Each structure stands twice: as C-alpha cells, then as structure tokens.
C-alpha cells in the first residue's frame, strides 16, 4: 500500500496545480464549472473545444519489488492509449491502468480531475503527439469540474513529459458514423 500524502500537501486541488505551474513561471487561469468535466466529451462541450483538444491524464502502473512504478499518460481525448505501444516506449512489462485508489494515492487527485502535473510525487509522463496539432489544449485542474488551457509545448514543459506515439485514434461507433452522416447532409 502507498503512503498517504503529508498533511501539508492536502489543500485545494486546483490551487496545487496553479502553484505547480507558477513554480515553472506559468500563470494558469483555472475555470470552474457547475457541471462535471469528468469525461473528454463533457470537457469539450463545457469549453466549446474539439474532443481532441482535451487532455486525458491517465495513470498506468507496472509491478516492481516494492509495489508499483507509475506512469502518467497525457492522451488526446479523441484517442485511446495502446498499452502495447506504451509498454514498448517505457520498456515496462505487465503495465496496466491504475485502479482508482492507486491513481489517487500516486497523484493526490481523483480520477476525472487528475491534472498533468502538480502531483504529490514525481511521475514519469508520456504525452500523445496528437496534442501538438492544436493551438491550445484543455486539462483537468485537480477536480472533475475545473480545467485550464495551455499550448501543447507549455503542457509538455509543465509536465516534464516525453512525447511518444502511445495512442491510436478512437474508431467511431456506428451511432457516431450515422450522426456524422446526417449532420453532413
């Protein structure tokens, strides 16, 4: 089991993200919504952005003798992480998605609000190169209803991320294809 964060680390989640960015010279504007921005689709609708501009902060773990080693993946909301690609990039075997409890213990944040940086401990971070095709991207700011926007290069710097091809484009479902066909008519 992982240790709980020290009491000094427990303060407003969004403020921890703002403070982490400020330590690297970046001022963030955090937006708080009444509704949830827990999913990429909810976040995109709330900020009026393409779902691809939404940064999914996903925690993965691989077993080590002392427990687990964590990795944070920053993926475009339009993509899904290819675990085999991630495993190859990290040269880690048996990598898997962290449980909700593991993610909270490793980052200090709950799933749906995990930011790309400002965690309670350093975490290796890999960034989806697809995020670089946008002028700005939107990330969770510590809670399921807070977000901030930054340029992808700034995000990479703030998260100390390595950019690597670890995701694939999510295929649309028949329902999405039908909706697309009717909207283009």
Image (spheres, grey):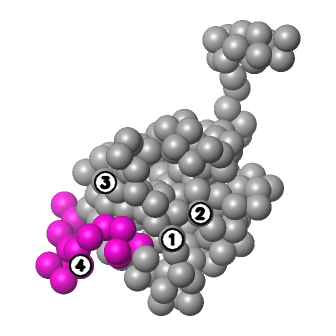
Marks 2/1: CA distance? 8 Å
Residue that appears at 48% across and 86% down: 22
Which stretch is magenta? 1-17
| Crowd around label 3: few <14 · some 14–19 · many ≥20 (10 Å) | some
Q: Which residue is mark 4?
A: 9
Q: Which residue is mark 3?
A: 110
Residue 134 in the image, given as x and y percentages of width and height: 76, 56
Marks 3/1: CA distance? 21 Å
Marks 4/1: CA distance? 21 Å
> Which of pointers 3 and 2 lies earlier in the amino acid sequence?
3
Residue 53 in the image, given as x and y percentages of width and height: 66, 50
Say whether residue 109 is magenta. Answer: no
3 or 1: mark nearer the eye: 1
Residue that appears at 85% across and 11% down: 185
Q: Which residue is mark 1?
A: 29
Q: In the structure shown, which secondary structural element does the residue marked by tag 2 occupy?
A: strand
Contact, CB < 8 Å: mark 2 with mark 4? Answer: no
Contact, CB < 8 Å: mark 3 with mark 4? Answer: no
> Which of pointers 2 and 4 lies earlier in the amino acid sequence?
4
Q: Is residue 66 above or below residue 18?
A: above
2 or 1: mark nearer the eye: 1
Apparent side of residue 25 relative to residue 23 in the rendered image (left or right): right
Which quadrant would the N terminus be assigned to in this image?
A: bottom left
Q: Is residue 124 above or below residue 32?
A: below
Contact, CB < 8 Å: mark 4 with mark 1? Answer: no
Q: In the structure shown, which secondary structural element does the residue marked by tag 4 occupy?
A: helix
């Amino acid at each position: 089991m992982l240790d709980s964060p020290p009491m000094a680390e427990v303060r407003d989640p969004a403020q921890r993200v703002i403070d982490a960015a400020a330590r690297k010279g970046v001022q963030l504007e955090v937006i708080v919504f009444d509704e949830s921005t827990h999913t990429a689709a909810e976040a995109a609708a709330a900020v009026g952005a393409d779902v691809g501009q939404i940064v999914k902060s996903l925690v993965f773990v691989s077993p080590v003798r002392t427990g687990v080693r964590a990795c944070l993946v920053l993926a475009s909301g339009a993509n899904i992480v290819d675990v085999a690609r991630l495993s190859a990039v990290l040269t880690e075997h048996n990598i898997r998605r962290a449980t909700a409890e593991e993610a909270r213990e490793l980052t200090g944040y709950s799933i749906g609000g995990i930011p790309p940086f400002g965690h309670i401990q350093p975490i290796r971070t890999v960034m989806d190169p697809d995020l670089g095709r946008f002028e700005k991207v939107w990330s969770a700011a510590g809670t399921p209803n807070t977000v901030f926007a930054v340029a992808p290069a700034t995000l990479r710097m703030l998260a100390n991320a390595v950019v690597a091809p670890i995701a694939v484009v999510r295929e649309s479902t028949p329902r999405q294809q039908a909706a697309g066909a009717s909207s283009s008519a």
